[in-house]
Image (cartoon, grey):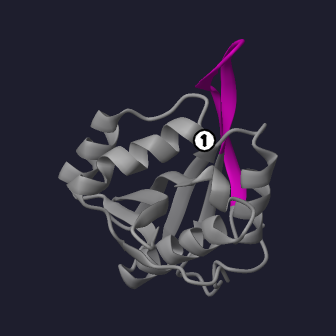
Amino acid sequence: MYAGVCVREMQERDLDAVLAIEQSVQAYPWTRGQFADSLDAGYWCQVDEADGELRGYAIMMPAVDEAELLTIGVAATQQRKGLGRAMLGGMLELARAKNMRRVLLEVRPSNMAAVALYRSAGFSEVGLRRGYYRDASGSEDALVMACELLDGTNGAGEANG
């Protein structure tokens, strides 16, 4: 696991730093308003901070007995060091602690690093949303992935299948 992970609840004062990370790592970033709306809606919004610097964030939307990971991002200087994996694991633990049955997410099939991360964390493909994401050619499909939490799997190992 990533050394020195310091995750806490996102606050309104974090929005500018979160947006800066988002804009630097996403071709089609969320807006400040989307992050603010997530906070206002009571979604589970987490940030990782070290030495006064935000290094990553994750937002999950709870529903009755499942949650959807809406976004997760890690500052470019912190990528490929395990922080994203640690934050994802923390979000899965939060969902498990809140008695969620499963966590869903959408991911671009072209984002092979993210797809591999999610598979290694116990997610498996459960669907496809055609034309879900904007891209340079118009749109890109989204893989819908799920991680079962309360069926005896631990959500941290092999993909369910």
Is residue 160 shown to the viewer in this render?
no
At 34% from the left and 59% from the top, the residue drawn is 63
From the image, give the main secondary structure of the stretch colored magenta: strand
Q: Residues within 10 Å of mark 1 (few under 14, many from 20)?
A: some
Nearest the viewer among 16 and 158 is: 16
The part of the image, by quadrant, that contains residue 137 is top right
Q: Is residue 87 left or right of residue 125?
A: left
Q: Residue furthest left?
A: 40
- Residue that badge 1 annotates: 25
Q: Which amino acid lies under the numbered mark 1 shown in the image of this protein?
A: Val
Nearest the viewer among 27 and 61 is: 27
Q: Is residue 103 above or below residue 25?
A: below
Q: Is residue 143 left or right of residue 23?
A: right
Q: Is residue 69 left or right of residue 26?
A: left
At 39% from the left and 50% from the top, the residue drawn is 17
The part of the image, by quadrant, that contains residue 129 is top right
In the rendered view of the protein, which quadrant contains the C terminus? bottom right
Residue 105 % position (x, y): 56, 52
At 44% from the left and 63% from the top, the residue drawn is 53
Q: Is residue 161 left or right of residue 74?
A: right
At 61% from the left and 29% from the top, the residue drawn is 27
Residue 95 % position (x, y): 43, 74
Specify the segment rendered in magenta. Answer: 124-143
Q: Is residue 82 above or below residue 79?
A: below
Q: Is residue 64 above or below residue 128?
A: below
Is residue 138 shown to the viewer in this render?
yes
In the rendered view of the protein, which quadrant contains the N terminus? bottom right
